[in-house]
Image (tube, rainbow, N blue to C red):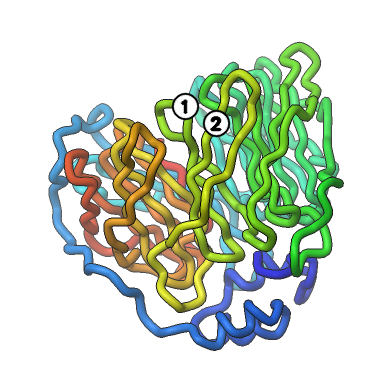
């Protein structure tokens, strides 16, 4: 993250190292290796989160019905490399009514599982292995057996997703700025990759020394796959050949120089998407054309973080398309937006303290009634009840402790 992810300490990418720092230490590290504008921003960081305080409560104010009954599974991604890191994929359950999380153990044998995804049939869990020689690992959920791993061909994979058809796995390598495709066999295991593309054009943005692919997802219509690259300030659109597993670039969308786009999330209508720009601390509404795959990036707008150092991480949009939420790392809040004009506009409503430090990733429960935030620096997972009428977030008790929590996957 920041100006250049290739800088490292003890073999860690700068992206990972900064996420472990807290308070003034983080600002110092960023200032030491950032651009002049980042140094100024870091030095002006203000302490404490701004926004309205969430109120813990034991029952959600929502009209949704819980997904099934009894406890539901929750998986937590982490880094295993640091001395105080996790030991593998965290295993837990959560109560759909109260949001309470209960730890049930750890799935060991998976190195640096920093991002998680599940197969559409629910039987297989996938994790990136965010190391210099990157890989993806598949786990059978029924007995927690490791089905196998495949090399991504790149460095430091930080994101993966499963194509809706369930036959292809998509990964993004941050360190090498590459994206890759893998076939998924009948057991759920990934085979040898069928394609890999390293982003070589346009040139890296201000303060960057190379491409940094941060996300690789499928459009809602299923016709295209999109890769968000922080290093080149670009979102690339590809067509995926679903027979051969190969990629063909069809469009590029460029942010303003130095924005550092990180994650893209589509509105349910499929015509608009919301982009979190990590480096310049902005958000943007993007128009999407399903016929061509072309994305058009709108004007930058506020994340609600004020003047302090902040790195927006990820958007979520409610199933009814009425509200959007953005995780703010540094400001340590979740920004709440009203979605207007059928998805074409975001209006910032407020920011809600996340009750943790450095919310790296957020996710809804399957029914949308709960929002989970994985807080990297505090090593916690916060849970909020989501009001489907007002979009309000209400903290569901004390956060759950989990070492270096960087991804929460509720099922």
Whether the residues at callouts 1 and 2 have beta carbons within 8 Å, the answer is yes
Dot 2: what SS? strand
Residues packed near mark 1 inside 10 Å, few (<14), some (14 to 19) or many (20 plus): some
- Comparing labels 1 and 2, the label whose residue is closer to the camera: 2
> Which numbered disc flags the more N-terminal residue, 1 or 2?
1
Q: Nearer the viewer, residue 258 or 25?
A: 258
In the rendered structure, find residue 270 and report the number of the disc placed on it.
1
Q: Residue at x 69, y 22 (%)?
A: 184
Q: Residue at x 19, y 44 (%)?
A: 387
Q: Which x, y percent locates residue 255?
A: 64, 51
Work out whether residue 115 or residue 50 is closer to the camera in this orientation and state it. 50
Of 250 and 385, the residue lying toward us: 250
Q: Which mark is residue 90?
A: none
- 244 relative to 161 in the view: left or right: right
Q: Position of residue 246 (x, y in %)?
A: 80, 23
Pinpoint residue 374: horizontal percent, then vertical percent: 45, 57
Residue 123 shows in the view: no
The residue wearing badge 2 is: 288
Describe residue 399's horizontal placement relative to residue 314 as left or right.
left
Is residue 237 positioned above or below 35 on the image? above
Residue 180, image x, y percentages: 77, 35
Q: Pointer 2: residues within 10 angstroms few (<14), some, or many (20+)?
A: some
Q: Is residue 388 above or below residue 337?
A: above
Residue 203 falls left or right of residue 229: right
Q: Give me the residue at 48% from left, 45% from top.
A: 285
Horizontal side of 249 relative to 280 (left or right) equals right
SS at badge 1: loop
Q: Would you say residue 171 is visible in this rendering?
A: yes
């Amino acid at each position: 993250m920041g100006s250049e992810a290739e800088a490292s300490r003890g073999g860690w990418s700068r992206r990972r190292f900064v996420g472990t720092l807290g308070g003034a230490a983080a600002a110092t590290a960023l200032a030491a290796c950032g651009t002049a504008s980042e140094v100024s921003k870091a030095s002006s960081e203000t302490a404490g989160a701004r926004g309205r305080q969430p109120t813990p409560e034991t029952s959600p104010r929502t009209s949704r019905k819980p997904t099934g009954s009894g406890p539901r599974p929750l998986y937590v991604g982490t880094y295993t490399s640091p001395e105080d890191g996790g030991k593998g994929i965290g295993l837990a359950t959560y109560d759909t009514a109260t949001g309470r999380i209960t730890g049930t153990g750890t799935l060991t044998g998976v190195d640096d599982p920093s991002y998680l995804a599940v197969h559409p049939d629910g039987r297989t869990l996938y994790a990136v292995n965010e190391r210099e020689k990157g890989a993806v690992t598949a786990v059978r959920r029924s007995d927690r057996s490791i089905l196998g791993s495949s090399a991504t061909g790149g460095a430091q994979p930080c994101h993966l997703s499963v194509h809706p058809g369930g036959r292809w796995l998509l990964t993004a390598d941050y360190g090498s700025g590459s994206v890759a495709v893998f076939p998924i066999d009948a057991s759920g295991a990934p085979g040898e990759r069928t394609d890999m593309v390293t982003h070589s054009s346009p040139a890296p943005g201000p303060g960057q020394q190379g491409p940094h692919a941060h996300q690789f997802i499928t459009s809602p219509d299923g016709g295209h796959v999109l890769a968000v690259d922080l290093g080149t300030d670009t979102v690339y659109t590809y067509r995926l050949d679903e027979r051969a597993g190969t990629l063909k670039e069809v469009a590029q969308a460029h942010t303003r120089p130095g924005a550092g786009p990180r994650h893209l999330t589509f509105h349910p209508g499929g015509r608009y998407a919301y982009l979190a720009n990590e480096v310049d601390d902005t958000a943007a509404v993007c128009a999407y054309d399903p016929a061509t795959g072309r994305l058009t990036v709108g004007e930058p707008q506020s994340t609600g973080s004020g003047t302090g150092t902040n790195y927006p991480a990820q958007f979520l949009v409610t199933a009814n398309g009425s509200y959007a939420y953005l995780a703010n790392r540094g400001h340590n809040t979740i920004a709440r937006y009203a979605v207007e004009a059928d998805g074409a506009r975001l209006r910032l409503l407020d920011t809600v303290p996340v009750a943790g430090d450095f919310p790296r990733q957020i996710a809804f429960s399957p029914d949308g009634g709960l929002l989970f935030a994985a807080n990297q620096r505090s090593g916690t997972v916060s849970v909020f009840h989501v009001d489907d009428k007002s979009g309000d977030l209400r903290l569901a008790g004390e956060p759950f402790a989990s070492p270096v929590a960087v991804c929460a996957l509720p099922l």
